[in-house]
Amino acid sequence: MIRFENVVKRYGDFEALGGVSLEVAQGQLVTLLGPSGCGKTTLLRTVNRLIEPTEGTVFVGNRDVRGLDGVELRRGMGYVIQSIGLFPHMSVLENVMVVPRLLGWKKEKREARAKEMLALVGLEPQTFAGRYPRELSGGQAQRVGLARALAADPPVLLLDEPFGAVDPPTRERLQDEFLKLQSELRKTVLFVTHDLEEAVKISDRICLMNGGRVEQYDPPEVLLRRPKTPFVQSFLGPSRTLLRLSRIPLGGLIEPLDSHRPSVSIPHSASAREAFSTLLASGLRTLGVSDATGRLVGLVRLETLLAAVSEEEA
Ligand SMILES: Nc1ncnc2c1ncn2[C@@H]1O[C@H](COP(=O)(O)OP(=O)(O)OP(=O)(O)O)[C@@H](O)[C@H]1O
């Protein structure tokens, strides 16, 4: 769906991108991850032609973006940046309708669509449609930015640190909501972040960059299990094992209940990492696992979690 072929970007003598080749399949969520200045934003912006590569080619849906009109290209893609960029003099509803209006949609159609998008990102249209950006919290503004990016139903979303400007709990909630949306909408998403945890949590594949080059391009599990270079290893750091647990669903590790009733339990939907943290915090060796109604349905043991990590290591 999006393909970079040997993309180079130079500013004078400085090489911001040193020959990036990468393919993002349709419906996949790929994060561009790496330290500050490694070229993530530069690479993202070559897709909607806010930046023109010095060498190399970017394809969207098999079409070289150079052959496409920049303005039309940008209208056909959702784009969200950290500072959100909502128009301060426009209401929330008007902000969300910007692209449908540029595309010439009729008033009723674009209003209906904008309200639908607000509801989709968890903002009750009756409450929020008439508000102005200054009357929103950071998290609400981020949601409006996302609703605006989704309004014209673009197949491609370019997100540059879209949850960067909010506090950690809000950020986690936005990530969860976004993942749920993505599982329904299946957009092709390029997502810039410098946050390893965020990348591990949301990505189908992570493109870890360093100095304008791709160090490793793999699903999170593979990146965490088999770092290809010393840079990747040091970037992942000591939290690598815990992060791997966060990608292991608890489902396959649950054992049937026995006569022993554990005093602490966690929901079935939790990750192995949440189970591990709860075990550490409680000092127990066994946790109960409950279903959506809170009924105890099984057990998970500390040894099982440790074995799951070391098995993967093999
Ligand atoms: N217009 C420009 N002129 C010169 N150098 C530039 C220009 N734009 C970006 N750069 C440089 O290119 C490199 C890559 O920048 P880019 O914004 O892509 O980094 P990034 O990985 O997104 O970083 P961050 O996480 O800090 O946003 C940086 O060293 C930056 O200083």
Image: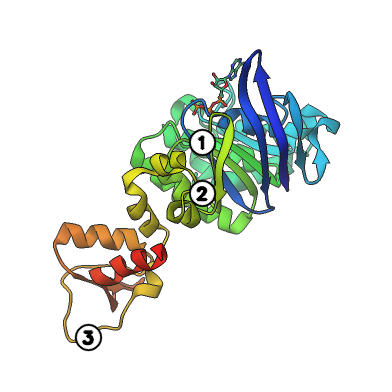
Q: Quadrant of residue 189?
A: top right
Residue drawn where x is 23% and y is 60% of the image: 278
Q: Please state which of the two labelled residues, at mark 3 or mark 1, is closer to the viewer.
A: 3
- When asked about the image quadrant of residue 52, the answer is top right
Estimate the x, y position of residue 265 in percent, counting from the top left. Answer: 24, 69
The residue at which mark 3 appears reads as 258
Q: Which residue is mark 2?
A: 178
Image position of 35 (left or right of 287): right
Whether label 3 lies within 8 Å of ligand 1 gets the answer: no
- Residue 162, which numbered label? 1
Query: What is the three-letter code of the residue carrying label 3?
Result: Asp
Q: Residues within 10 Å of mark 3 (few under 14, many from 20)?
A: few
Where disc 1 sits, the SS reads: loop
Q: 148 or 244, which lies in front?
A: 244
Image-quadrant location for residue 171: top left
Q: Position of residue 167 (x, y in %)?
A: 35, 35
Q: Is residue 255 left or right of residue 151?
A: left
Which sits earlier in the primary sequence, circle 3 or circle 2?
A: 2
Query: Quick one: label 3 or label 1, which is nearer the N terminus?
Result: 1
Please name whichever residue, 111 or 219, is drawn nearer the observer in this view of the structure.
219
Percent x, y of residue 101: 74, 33
Any part of residue 95 in sight = yes
User: Is 242 situated left or right of 86 in this image?
Assistant: left
Residue 280 in the image: state x and y as whole percent. Answer: 19, 59
- Tell me whether the residue at label 3 lies in contact with that at label 2, contact meaning CB atoms closer than 8 angstroms: no
Q: Residue drawn at (66%, 36%), measured in percent from left and top?
A: 20
Q: Nearer the viewer, mark 3 or mark 2?
A: 3
Amino acid type, callout 1: Pro
Q: Amino acid at mark 2?
A: Phe
**Mark 2 vs 1: CB contact within 8 A:** yes
Q: Earlier in the sequence, mark 2 or mark 1?
A: 1
Evaluate whether residue 270 shows in this view: no
